[in-house]
Amino acid sequence: MTDTDSLTTDEWRVFATHDFFLKKATISAKLKRMLGQLHVALQPELAGRQLIAPVGFDTEAFQFVKGEHLEDCPYQYLDFPRFYTRHDKLAFRSLCWWGHHLVFALIVEGPLVKQYRTNIFNRFSEIADRQLSVSLSSSLWEWKTGPGYTLDITNNRRSEIAAALDRRTFFKIARFIPIQDFNADTDQIIHAGVTTFQSMLPIITH
């Protein structure tokens, strides 16, 4: 065994910390319940809406996912609404990424992207300055934020946003919230998710 295979003193200490793993399990269960409450809170936001949606879109479709390896960190998310095919996507993802941030993201791909993009600029004043960002990544599944990763949607960046979205067949609009911004009130997170979805509705509605 090489030195790189051996656990360090600090790693052995973490390995021996039984309480950490119990807390992780408790936190995961609470995050799942919180995402479940968010799912319930989002349902009225879809009721009666005339969405610009792909054929086959189901307003009741949703999914909860839990994993351990988003860049080596655990994650949990809710997709609601949720529509994914190889060529068409319309989804709102609420992602809790351990050690990073919470993300509320609109994910779109396919022929309807042209209409979504038109809506962004026809309704720019409704979307800008709402703490939303455009993902600059060539992948819909990049979840980092900051310079080189995202571009804030503000009224003074209309031309930059237009350039970033030009000719794209998919895009992602997201709100990133540092974990440190939240306190013990679960309602705070649910409210953030609902208000973020509301701020994105002008993009995907008639």
Image (cartoon, rainbow, N blue to C red):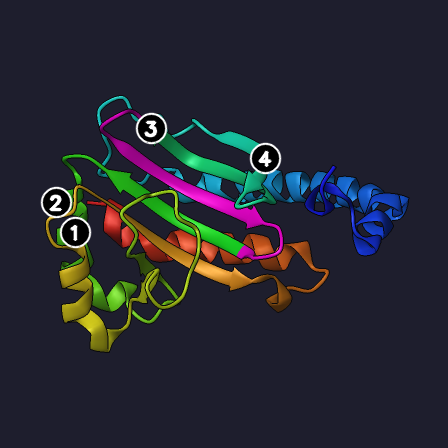
Q: Secondary structure at mark 1?
A: helix
Q: Which residue is mark 3?
A: 84
Q: Which residue is mark 1?
A: 117
Query: Is 134 placed left or right of 166 in the picture?
Result: right
Using the numbered discs, state the Cα–Cα distance from disc 2 to disc 3 in whole angstroms.
18 Å
In the displayed image of the protein, which residue is found farthest to the bottom? 156
The quadrant holding residue 169 is top left
Q: Earlier in the sequence, mark 2 or mark 4?
A: 4
Q: Earlier in the sequence, mark 3 or mark 4?
A: 4
Q: Which residue is mark 4?
A: 67
The quadrant holding residue 48 is top left
Q: Secondary structure at mark 2?
A: helix
Give, as a single range, the part of the protein colored magenta.
Answer: 84-101
Crowd class of label 2 (few under 14; some 14 to 19; many from 20; radius 10 Å): some
Q: Is residue 86 magenta?
A: yes
Using the numbered discs, state the Cα–Cα distance from disc 2 to disc 4 in whole angstroms.
33 Å
Q: Amino acid at mark 4?
A: Gly
| On-image quarter of the C terminus | top left
Crowd class of label 4 (few under 14; some 14 to 19; many from 20; radius 10 Å): few
Using the numbered discs, state the Cα–Cα distance from disc 3 to disc 4 in whole angstroms.
19 Å
Instruction: Tell me, yes or no, if residue 50 can be seen here.
Output: no
Q: Earlier in the sequence, mark 2 or mark 3?
A: 3
CB atoms of marks 1 and 2 within 8 Å: yes
Query: Is 149 placed left or right of 114 in the picture?
Result: right
At which x and y percent is residue 92?
Answer: 40, 42
Disc number at residue 114? Answer: 2
Q: Nearer the viewer, mark 4 or mark 1?
A: 4
At which x and y percent is residue 153?
Answer: 29, 67
Image vertical order of residue 28 relative to residue 162, above or below = above
In the displayed image of the protein, which residue is found farthest to the top? 56
CB atoms of marks 2 and 3 within 8 Å: no
